[in-house]
Image (spheres, rainbow, N blue to C red):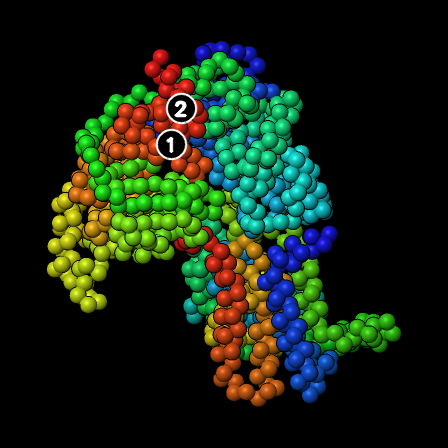
Amino acid sequence: MPDAVAAQGAFLELSGISKRYAGVRALEGVDFACERGKIHAVLGENGAGKSTLIKIIAGVVQPDSGRMRLAGHDVTFATPSAANEAGVVCIFQELSLMPDLSVADNISIASPPRRFGLIDNRAQRRRAEQLLAEIGCEDINPLMRVRDLPLSRRQIVEIAKALGKRPRLLILDEATSALTSADVEKVYAMLARLKSEGVAILYISHRMHEVEALADRASVFRNGRHIETFDKGGRSTAEIVQLMIGRDIATQYPVKPVRTSVRPMLALDNLSWEGRLDRISLRVGAGEIVGLGGLDGQGQKSLLLALFGVLRGITGRVTVEDRDIRPSSPAAAKSAGIALVPEDRKTEGLMLPMSIVDNLVVASLDAISTGSLVDRAKERAAVERAIARLQIKIGAPGDAVSTLSGGNQQKVVLAKWLMTEPRIILLNDPTRGIDVGTKQELYRLMRELADQGAAILFYSTDYDELIGCCDRVAIMYDGRIVRELRGSDLTETNIIASALNIDAASAASAAHA
Amino acid sequence: MLDDLAIRVRQNVGIVTAVLLFCILYVLYNLAHPKGFSSAVLVQNSDEIFALAMLAMAQTVPVLASGLDLSVGAVMTMVGCFASYLLTGTAAGAPLHLDIFGLHLFLGSFPGGISGILLGIVVCLAIGAAAGFVNGCVVVYGRIQPIIATLATGAVYIGIALFLRPTPGGKIDEDLNWALTNSLGDFAQTVHIFDDGAAGWFAPLAWIPVPFVLLVLIALLVWMPFRRSVLGRAVYAVGSAEGAAYMSGLPIDRAKIAAFTLAGFFAGCGGLFLAIQTSSGNADIPQAGAYTLNSIASVVIGGTSLLGGTGSAIGSIFGAMILRVISFFFRIFDIAPLLQPLFEGLILLAAVSIGALGVLRVRNTLELFR
């Protein structure tokens, strides 16, 4: 229970911390504490508030309310460097390295060793060698540019950089996710040593076996609240999964049709890319909505990009209606009847300063043109049809698309692609940042499109949505599809268990118990 | 150790290529020249190279921070016009007048003699640095893209230059002109050091051109320390990944201001030398534009990425020298000088294409647009 943690000797104490982003609650009245010489795991599903929590501790964002105490003193960190000076060092998921600078430069970037006022390159190099040796990765030459290192080695450099700041509180946010298993062992050994030296360690990981192996204590977060903190062995894996599952008010979803046979539309066989997608085989039939689930960053986005022709160097086979296709660019994917609603609607989905009309017709200019000139009458008719079909709420069609609300912007993106009459629709988290009402409209539209014969591949970070909308859900982990859930198996417990790649059976049995 | 060398060569392949290309071209040029490999040819070439080499260094620093400075040519021109008032070398000093809005103001007399000349040089360089500082402040505090900020300030600097010298004119001390645009021997003779350049130990050095020595000194005493300073490191970091630089607690704003200030200083050096070389001040707008564009070309040929983060002012010096050597070839081979822009353009295209080969390695084509 939380009170057990608030015991004396807490190094970092948070009380009543709240944070909202644009009205959306990220953290609500969080009390949290961690001690020196302990590894403290922070658990929770996507959007549970873990990232916001560590960003507040590390000085990246400021809380709206609440108090933070470090070693018994009230502190506020205006910037990450202010936190660093107080001994709070965070290794972020998004790397904080400068790719064009050398490993040695990067490790000492904040306070390089100096001689006569100038950076002492030799001392800096020795320092880098020494820190890399502390992790057991002497094989990295400090002269190398970070750009030329593979992702896993960059992560090691990131860790060495953090170590160089001699932290009193070290925060690792998914810091091992990119590491090879040999390097993971080395990082474990390093963490154990830091622990024995009295460093407080906050550890965020989606890998349950890591948490079990490392953590002395764990805290579970859900929907921006601190749910429970327990010592090692205090809870079973299955119980932890139960703690992580939210009990939100259910949204209304359109009824799923019962089908006896499905006409195959899209088939993937052994699709691989750059070690990020690993032999993916998947079938999506006409009229089917297939979900892509799992934790963030397990390859779901890459898979959609691969199908849409954005990625180079793909191996494996893609067939549409039994014909091999090899999408080499978004333009090629479009002519094969594929549409993608991309991840970031502001940069990849829309041309914000351009008008609603221009955005709507941009993917189907061929269809409304005579020769190489756009036919104004056809354009107007097509736009009116699209606006009516999706019930997009607009002022005038000539207004800049940036004037619309998030939900209506997303409708414009979708409408743009529907104008191309796609056979296969790829959706990359389309309901992110959209109000509940528009979400439900989108769900209905998806089902309608499926009923008209489209094949839909739908990635969402919201499990509830996957369960409500999808006929089947493929769960990805580390670039692979680890499980396909359908029918009565399609439950939140099963999704989370598969997403964490732990024994689904044990989690399920606990849920029924 | 061999590993280290291999890594360094691989990381500086742009600069190494530029150095090799320059060496080959310059040896060929001297072989073809009737008086090749002589001090006279070397002196003449150094004089012609110096100003552009300075502007190339100037352009490098903002480019490293992923900005572009379109005002370097204008700063050069403005400083040259100031120099034509301040470096006249008249023993009694130069009277300075200001005619503005129908008013005639006497600003006092600028000191003459040797001390006056030294003071004049310092003032000219300070004006260059100040112009760069203004650029930096407009970019950082005005939050304006460098390319448009410096386009505007560049027009202002040209305006000041035109105000100072509506027509070419002014004067530069003859001894100063002679001492800085010839060989070390001539320099020693003019300023009366080393027994007027006759000292025995000095003889083997007497052939070296003064502009060449100045170039090396500026590179060693200004650029190298800057590169190894925390601020210099921050300039590279900002150009490489500004977000990561911020998250690492680097002084981003100060780094950008420093980059533009140093650019102004280098451009000032170029303007000062050009004025000394031509013995006059000239608010030549086409020349300012040409120098700015050539400075960008030099930076690219010298192996610095226009995206920022990688490269060096040393490479840019070689880029500038390559551009100049190409024009030398036109002189000795008697090719129609009108073809010169064509060849310069082709070489620039080739250099840029080599730099762009990395695009082929990108595996996620979405990254090309970020």
Most foreground residue, A235 or B78: A235
What's the mark number on residue A178?
A: none
Classify mark 2: residues with Cα within 10 Å, few (<14), some (14-19) or many (20+): some
Question: Horizontal and vertical percent for residue A237?
Answer: 45, 19
Q: Identify the chain of the residue marked 2, using the numbered disc in the image.
A: A
Residue matched to label 1: A483
Label 1, secondary structure: give it. Answer: strand
Under mark 1, the amino acid is Arg
* Up/down of B345 relative to B140, above or below: below
The part of the image, by quadrant, that contains residue A10 is top right
Separation (CA) of disc 2 from disc 1: 10 Å
- Residue at 66% x, 80% y is B28
The part of the image, by quadrant, that contains residue A160 is top right
Asked whether the residues under the numbered discs 2 and 1 touch, taking CB atoms below 8 Å apart as contact, a structural biologist would say yes
- Residue at 35% x, 12% y is A513
Residue A25 visible? The answer is: yes
* Up/down of A7 relative to A468, above or below: above
Classify mark 1: residues with Cα within 10 Å, few (<14), some (14-19) or many (20+): some
Question: Horizontal and vertical percent for residue A269?
Answer: 37, 45
Most foreground residue, B256 or A296: A296
Label 2, secondary structure: give it. Answer: helix
Residue matched to label 2: A504
Q: Is residue B178 left or right of residue B242?
A: right
Under mark 2, the amino acid is Ala
Question: Horizontal and vertical percent for residue A35?
Answer: 56, 18
- Residue at 14% x, 56% y is A380
Q: Identify the chain of the residue marked 1, using the numbered disc in the image.
A: A
Residue A165 visible? The answer is: no
Most foreground residue, B148 or B244: B244
Most foreground residue, B352 or A421: A421
Q: How many marks?
A: 2
Q: Does label 2 or label 1 sit earlier along the sequence? A: 1
